[in-house]
Image: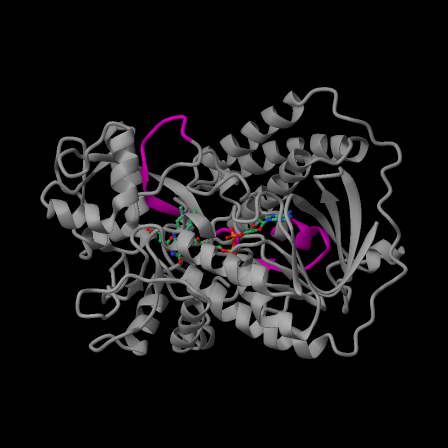
Amino acid sequence: MSIKTDFLIIGSGIAGLSYALKVAPYGKVCMITKADEDESNTKYAQGGIAAVMYHPDSYEKHIKDTLIAGDGICDEDVVRMVITESNKRINELIAWGANFDKTETGEYDLAREGGHSEHRILHHKDNTGFEIERALLAAVHKHPNIKILDHHFAIDILTQHHLGIEVNSKTPNIECYGAYVLNLHTNEIETILAKATLMATGGAGNVYSTTTNPSIATGDGVAMIYRAKGRVEGMEFYQFHPTSLYNPGEKPSFLISEAVRGFGGILKTIDGKEFMQKYDARKSLAPRDIVARAIDNEMKIRGDDYVYLDCRHLNKNELIKHFPNIYQKCLNTGIDITKDYIPVVPAAHYMCGGIKVDKNGQSSIKYLYAVGECSSTGLHGANRLASNSLLEAAVYAHHAAMDSIEKIKPVNFCEKIPAWNAEGTHHPEEMVLLTQTLREVQSIMTYYVGIVRSDLRLQRAFDRLEILYKENETLYLKTTISPKLCELRNLINVAYIIIKHARNRKESRGLHYTVNYPKVDNNVQ
Ligand code: FAD
Ligand code: SIN
């Protein structure tokens, strides 16, 4: 079966939904998403969305904070563009129906998070992402030009390669014609032809054993673009959030928002002593790379499995009012955050690198845009500033929409793309081949390519991953396509790129810390 659409959107988080609403007046939109339509990283965002709202805050302060967190390699033009457009895009989210909390005087209630010099986080209690996802989906449902196909899994994008033309990373004009998509309702692989395709597939937290990301975050977009010979950059900068709830066996790990530290929560070792003063003058509110590394170090020195976040000194009613979900979740696991310490550990959280795009969200592949966590715009540099992710997605959805509306005008569908060929493939005999390989990938990444790296660990990771890559490619070619098989293949691709980029960066910067090159080296690109 083949579908034709002006705009194909892969992913239904903030990036895909905002782009859909912007392009829908100009053509037919087909949005595919691999699970339920609301399942996404977006839905779990807690702290909020960063924006400059009132004096004494200013764009210059937000720009400076973003550049400092990014540790010297943000693209300053991009930082300026995103931050100075923040209010316009946030007003759009509000117009589409998203609610952000206000104080009794009617002003927006702004929270503070690590690395921010001012209170500037718009939020909806401690479940901002859920509110944004709800509002955007409701707006999308009302638009007659937008069709959402849930439980549709994008396998690969379509390029000249599918017309039998050889494509490599030096091919000057790789073009995207749409995607092969597995319809999980029928188990058929459909060809979706599009004039413009948007990759909005989010992050890849599941490449590590412990992550705050839901199970959908398997780096599919980055892997698809990498296989199609598009440009991917900055993957060595995988952000670990300092404070996920220590609750062994729980997947995903539950996040204890950085806004809790912004509200006054203090990190302590399990003997009740503060330690962040040893690492940074901003203490518990230093940028994430610094706090996560400090926690990792304290746990290693002391041999502890976690550290504590202490909120016991904070106003009880205000704490519960601001963080009702965190309060309830902890209570369900036997922790009353108003009276007890909260045990926390770092967990893989956010992919700062990704598909390289220009200021319009255009990737190195023609007619293929990337927006949101799967993209690398230059905003985050070596470490993302808290709550800049939802903002980046909203701003780039706008730019990508404006650009693609113009670009598709002269484009025709590529009718010569052949249907998917499943010849010679069979149902898997043993699922354990997939589940065990996944555990091995996650374990390699966690122990050798985590918060602290070394040449030896990265070499080991590379050697071991190569074996898994070869085994899995052989399996892939003879096995009937399923999401589990594709996700494993994608995670192996993503792990490979992270290791490759980490090995190339012979310095420590932002989220990439290696004991062999412990300092920033400005001669390294
Ligand atoms: P997502 O929201 O992850 O959406 C990706 C979509 O792509 C999903 O619908 C998924 O099903 C679909 N998809 C993936 N692969 C395929 C495929 N092969 N085929 C079809 N569909 C596919 N950021 C902030 O700025 N502020 C915060 O407060 C904040 N809190 C966070 C809290 C948590 C617990 C987490 C996990 C993240 C948080 N972040 C926060 C980060 C932020 O939520 C994400 O970076 C952002 O929501 C990503 O949006 P997105 O649209 O790019 O991707
Ligand atoms: C949080 O609430 O701590 C997450 C914020 C973010 O990832 O930007």
Where residue 425 sits, quadrant-wise, is top right
Could you tell me which residue is drawn at 60 percent across and 65 percent down?
Answer: 143
User: Where is 341 relative to 290, above or below?
Assistant: above
Left or right placement of residue 476 versus residue 50 in this view:
right
Left or right placement of residue 342 versus residue 372 in this view:
left
Numbered label tally: 0
Indicate the position of residue 160 as horizontal and vertical percent values.
83, 60
Q: Is residue 233 magenta?
A: yes
Where residue 178 sits, quadrant-wise, is bottom right
Left or right placement of residue 40 versus residue 176 in this view:
left
User: Where is 174 relative to 87, above or below?
Assistant: above
Q: Which residues are magenta?
A: 222-250
Left or right placement of residue 84 versus residue 34 in this view:
left
Indicate the position of residue 326 as horizontal and vertical percent values.
28, 42
Indicate the position of residue 149 as horizontal and vertical percent values.
66, 50
| Colouring method of the image | one colour
Could you tell me which residue is drawn at 75 percent across and 36 percent down?
Answer: 481
Q: Which residue occupies the foreground of this view, 270 or 170?
A: 270
Q: Is residue 432 magenta?
A: no
Can residue 180 be seen from the camera position used here? yes
Q: Which residue occupies the foreground of this view, 353 or 9?
A: 9
Q: Which residue occupies the foreground of this view, 302 or 395?
A: 395
Where residue 10 sits, quadrant-wise, is bottom right
Indicate the position of residue 454 as horizontal and vertical percent values.
44, 41
Can residue 238 be seen from the camera position used here? no
